[in-house]
Amino acid sequence: AKAKPLSRRCVSLVAHDPDAPLAHGGELVLHDGRPVGEIASAAFGAAVGRVVALAYVSSGGETIDAAWLDGGRFEIEIAGVRAPAKASLKARPRHEPACDGQARIFRRSGSYGAFGERVAGTRWPKVSIS
């Protein structure tokens, strides 16, 4: 049996404008000016220097694939302001703004990496209690 095409999916969004207002979740997602879903989770992405978000979108019966995402204009309505965004089925969009590498500095600071793992060669600081 062939699987039915997905018409509701979780997509990643990256705002085009680095000065776009910060989204928190629950914001409206528009595709070609038509409401298609809402933000589930959002934050400022230090690696890309702009708002990144995960959203659930519905296509109204069309298959949601890379062609559908690339074939329309996405916007996130944040506090009444529409911020254009790039949508992707991957966590990191195929086209993302240039990163100046500053995020790597934050990932290596301290004894832990970006995902909470111990960074090789680091030691716990010695603490003396007098």
Image (cartoon, helix red, strand yellow):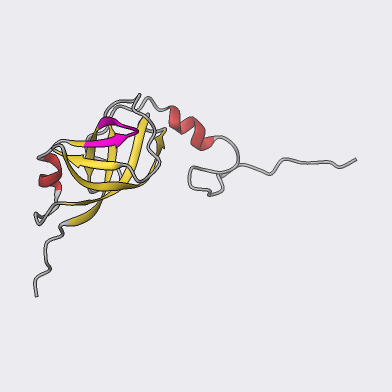
Q: Is residue 90 left or right of residue 33?
A: right
**In the image, which residues are magenta?**
75-83
Rendered position, 102 above or below 122: above
Residue 74 on the magenta span: no
Of all residues, the one furthest to the front in this rendering is: 80
Tell me residue 119's x, y (percent): 55, 44
| Residue found 15% across the figure and 35% down from its top | 73
Report the quarter where the N terminus lies. Answer: bottom left
Tell me residue 24's x, y (percent): 40, 41
Of all residues, the one furthest to the right in this rendering is: 130
Rendered position, 16 above or below 115: above
| Residue found 10% across the figure and 57% down from its top | 61
Among the 4 quarters of the image, the one containing residue 9: bottom left
Rendered position, 56 above or below 34: below
| Residue found 53% across the figure and 48% down from its top | 116
| Residue found 33% across the figure and 27% down from its top | 20
Provide the major secondary structure of the magenta segment: strand
